[in-house]
Amino acid sequence: MVAPLIVEELDVIVVGAGISGIGAAYHLSHRLPHKRYVVLEALESYGGTWLTHTYPGIRSDSDLHTFGYGFKPWRGKPIATAEEIRNYLGEVIEENGLDAHIRYRHHIATASWSSDEQRWTITGTRGDGEPFAVRAPFLYMCQGYYRHARGYMPTWPGMDDFQGTIVHPQNWPDDLDYRGKQVLVIGSGSTASTLIPAMAGDVGHITMLQRSPTYFRSGRNVNELAEALREVDTPEEWVHEIVRRRMIFESAKFTARCFAEPEVVKRELMENVRTRLKPEYRDSVDVDFNPRYLPWRQRLAFVPDGDLFEAINSGQASVVTDEIESFTATGIALKSGRHLDADIVVTATGFELSVLGDIEFSIDGRPLEFSDTVTFWGAMFTGVPNMVWVFGYLRASWTLRADMVAEFVCRLLAHMDDRGVTVVVPQLRSDDAGMELRPWITEDNFNPGYIQRGVHLLPKQGDRAPWLHTQDYWTEKDIMPAIDLDDSALVYR
């Protein structure tokens, strides 16, 4: 006889122990210490991206003074390795006793809401294959927005004919030996610009093959303001706050220039690359570092200490801008007629969008069509009770928004307790009838491939408050803390 499954009762269920989920746990512990919560993580440890990505040179593409938490000073270099980021997250867990709330190897299959019970029920299996179930009134989705198990892998003619090795960075083999090999990296974004300088010293030659170039910024991997403040024994908490504010300000100013004078910024970025390269490579800038789109319409890659350009200057790395005709037995044939030999092909082609962690959601027995919902300030969704989903910034550091959403969640839960209500659900008001609905991310605002491929899966936004997902830190830093929790768009019961 099989024993009945015991369903554990909690107040809040947090999904994901990456940077968003750990931040959520911190805020819940400090702001609502009476709440019983658990963090469910599918992987064997914490860290999310910084655990699953193991390719050579893996590092942040945001500065850690803003990618780190507002409550925990970052003391290292602005651009950090995955190991350094995981150490930082580990300190947050240890210093705040969060480990007692985190359960690893818990794979979630379903999330179902019952209006009769006013509860979310989460079911799945543990690492040992045993089923589990937990229930709570509130569900806090912090699992991110891409599929960790596999990356986006396009198909090209002739891939089966290739006699070498094809690797996606998201599934990097531990035993891949690339010493002395001819390596071809397909892609031109942050992953490619990280891999290439990390591998260049060991390979025979490494080539970045790109269909379209990416914008690069380059500079020293040092924050001079932070170092100057430390020289005069400024308390680390002060250093963190001052540098964080300065970095946010500079980032916003640069982003504004990208939209106000895009052609000027484009020329500056290309000239910066030109000055980094040796004279014999500078003629290639107009082809290989001249993107088709305007600055900041896709993620802009930072090259710390110019390491990508140093790899090119050394002769160990090169860039080819062309399109793939087909794979061959010994490499890749290009549409220009050129052939690139390769022993190893790395497909740095991006990731697959994952909406709500690929969990099967239902509300009162009906499957949730997430794309049919409209967002309430980019955090809650019409018709979905007691649930918040964290989606951070794409131009600024993800964690800036994750911190703000955590503060909103804690304020909302406290407000519900004060009102003596157990359910809250966003609902369009009568004067919102006929409101124009727009994509979660508009193409003219931000248009990388992974968004274009998956935007149809994401919620909509409206054309007025509170149905907006602005992706603008400087707007939201004032709006989010001041959201009216008694707005008629929030229906309580």
Image (cartoon, rainbow, N blue to C red):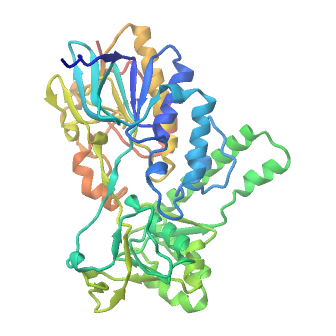
Does residue 351 lie above or below 325 as drawn? above
Given the current orientation, which residue lies at the most extreme left position?
A: 366
Does residue 78 lie above or below 143 as drawn? below
Does residue 414 lie above or below 81 as drawn? above
- 361 sits to left or right of 318: left
Residue 422 location, quadrant: top left
Give the x, y percent position of residue 234. Answer: 81, 42
Give the x, y percent position of residue 122. Answer: 29, 26
Given the current orientation, which residue lies at the most extreme top position?
A: 420
Choose between 210 and 298: the one closer to the eye: 210
The C terminus - image quarter? top left
Evaluate whether residue 441 shows in this view. Answer: yes
Give the x, y percent position of residue 416. Answer: 40, 14
Give the x, y percent position of residue 261. Answer: 49, 66
Residue 120 location, quadrant: top left
Residue drawn at (49%, 41%) of the image: 19
Choose between 332 and 162: the one closer to the eye: 162
Q: How many marks?
A: 0
- 77 sits to left or right of 233: left
The N terminus - image quarter? top left
- 326 sits to left or right of 198: left
- 43 sits to left or right of 26: left
Given the current orientation, which residue lies at the most extreme front position?
A: 1
Evaluate whether residue 295 shows in this view. Answer: no
Residue drawn at (54%, 77%) of the image: 200
Choose between 380 and 110: the one closer to the eye: 110
Residue drawn at (23%, 46%) of the image: 457
